[in-house]
Image (cartoon, rainbow, N blue to C red):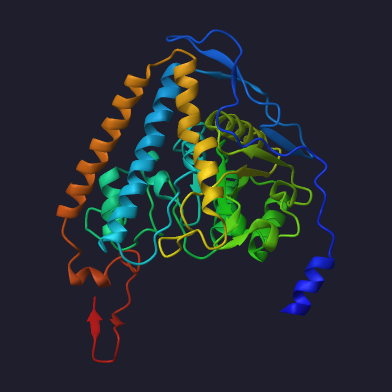
Amino acid sequence: MASLARIRSAVPRRMHLARAIQTAADTTQLHQDASHSEPFTVKLHEDSFHGYRTDTPGLDVEVTKENLMRWYKEMNVIRRVEQAADALYKQKLIRGFCHLAIGQEAISVGLNSATTFEDKIISSYRTHPFVILRGGTIKSLVGELLGRVCGVSKGKGGSMHVFTEAFQGGHGIVGAQVPLGAGLAFAQKYLGKKTATFAMYGDGASNQGQVFESFNMAKLWNLPCVFVCENNKYGMGTSAERSSSNTAYYTRGDTIPGIQVNGMDIIAVHQATKFAKDWVTSEKGPLLVEFVTYRYAGHSMSDPGTTYRTREEIQRMRSTQDPIRGLQRYITEWGLASEDELKAIDKEAKTEVEQAVEEAKASPFPDESELWTDIYSAGTEPPFMRGRDREEMHYY
């Protein structure tokens, strides 16, 4: 280990000559007077985007009060749900793995805002928000975390395996969803659909061989696939700098163009997603998008999140770059709503989540007979299934 440390110290640190991506959540400025009833234009910070082999999205963005208020409510609901999951896990009502997305709400809400339910989104396991945003309910998500029959996967999938008809799922094997995403994009192109696939993965999965294989196939076949790296700076307990020789993840597609995006400003996320969808549905081939973000909690509920980073770092991010606070500042400073109106939305979100949690807790667990269902598609089951030993057999 001492030799390794000497080698590491002898390697010169890479110099970042380009300006860093902006990750503050509240740097967007009014370009014209805000309107309560008509669209108006705002201007993103000049360092909201960086490009590789392509121009970047425009900085002038048209928004509406209706959209901003909806995004604010959605981000608040999502955070309340994740906080409820945290509490339920600590009460031992949620078992197994549980990965929270607190701090990353702008990505799920912003990405959903610029897509339709016809577009495909597939990701790893920090994916609770997409259930709520894409056809599920708070009760169905919480029920799944609790292993109840009201769960979106009938209580059998748990935190890492949640799906809706408009969300192609959370997947537990690191990086394995990326080739599945390429397959979804292939199907879209084969069927002639003008829709996009967003194949999401984290910085911790970025060095997987299957990720690069997917890049290659997508470029060869010109697939309408947006490869989305959610760079929250840490893969489990390892910082990006310690795991990746090139931490500019948006440049790692070789001949595939890429953009790096401020993942803490929801307006930047929305604009980048529109750009990405337009790119791949215009038959330009695949695109890499890196959202630079930050998770407040640990990698999972078993990780305190403070052994490989300081509490001061976490608190600094929460207090200066929080996506919900950033949007709150926009809404109030632009005169779209008062602080009391936003507090009412916060209170409504809290009540809605608390009610859904109680309803999910009242739902029963699946019957033992359900252990044998949903293993095979209906009509394709084998004559029997073996259990834990030869005597434990189930006949279909």
Residue 268 horizontal/vertical position (percent): 59, 31
Q: Image height check: is 14 above or below 133?
A: below
Q: Which residue lies at the image location 47% right of the left edge and 57% below the top edge?
A: 298
Give the residue displayed 60% in from the left and 19% down from the top: 29
* Quadrant including the C terminus: bottom left
Q: Is residue 314 left or right of residue 336?
A: right
Residue 346, image quadrant: top left
Residue 321 appears in the figure: no
Task: Give the x, y percent position of residue 101.
Answer: 45, 49
The x and y percentages for residue 385 are 30, 80
Indicate the quadrant where residue 361 lies.
bottom left
Identify which residue, 47 or 219, lies in the foreground: 47
In the displayed structure image, the side of residue 210 where residue 328 appears, left or right: left
Q: From what the image shows, is residue 159 above or below residue 382?
A: above
Residue furthest to the bottom in view is 390
Instruction: Give the camera-side residue of 24 and 187.
Output: 24
Q: Is residue 19 above or below residue 231?
A: above
Q: Residue at x 55, y 32 (%)?
A: 25
Q: Is residue 187 above or below residue 212?
A: above
Q: Position of residue 93 (x, y in %)?
A: 25, 61
| Residue at the farthest front position | 312
Q: How many marks?
A: 0
Instruction: Report if residue 308 is visible in the image.
Output: yes
Is residue 331 toward the left or the right of residue 367 in the image? right
